[in-house]
Every structure is written in C-alpha cells, then in structure tokens.
Image: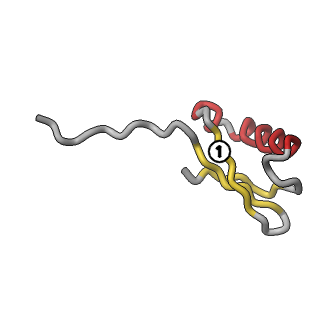
Amino acid sequence: MNTFRKTAPAKSVMFVVDYDDARRAYLWIDNPEKASDSRAIGLIARAQQEQGTLPGGNISSIRRIR
C-alpha cells in the first residue's frame, strides 16, 4: 500500500507584472505551454491591458512566481 501521492501539475501559472511607477499586478496564464515563452507572456499582458483586466501603464518587468 502506497500512502504517498504524486501532486498534480499546476493548471495555471502566475506572474507578477511590475510597472515603471512601482505599481504591481498579477497575471494568471491557464496554458502552461504558453507560460514558457516570454514573448508570448508580454503579448498576453499587453492584450489584457487593452481589454482592461490589467492596469494600463508602462510594464517594466514580468516575472513568473508560481
């Protein structure tokens, strides 16, 4: 009897978006395959800014945190 279980891989990936004026927002990507491409993350962040789900402004960095 095995009492240890493997954890399921995360279904979403979390990023922190830092702005030039010291603001911070969080971004969740549901597709882990897209989360490995830094260019795609930048495009997704800008698209979400246009939709209004992320605050507007100049993005200084995007880092993966989970």
Residue 29 coordinates in the image, percent (x, y): 64, 39
Q: Which residue, given by chain and number where applicable, does mark 1 sit on?
A: 28
Residue 41 coordinates in the image, percent (x, y): 72, 40
Q: Please report the residue visible at 76 percent of the width from the left and 38 percent of the height from the top.
A: 44
**Tag count in the figure?**
1
Residue 27 coordinates in the image, percent (x, y): 69, 48
Q: The N terminus lies in which quarter of the figure?
A: top left
Q: Is residue 33 left or right of residue 39?
A: left
Q: Residue furthest front?
A: 52
Secondary structure of the residue carrying tag 1 is strand
Q: Please report the residue visible at 70 percent of the width from the left and 41 percent of the height from the top.
A: 38
Q: Is residue 63 left or right of residue 54?
A: left
What's the coloring here? Answer: secondary structure
Q: Nearer the viewer, residue 30 or 61?
A: 30
Q: Please report the residue visible at 58 percent of the width from the left and 43 percent of the height from the top.
A: 13
Residue 15 coordinates in the image, percent (x, y): 64, 50
Residue type highlighted by circle 1: Trp
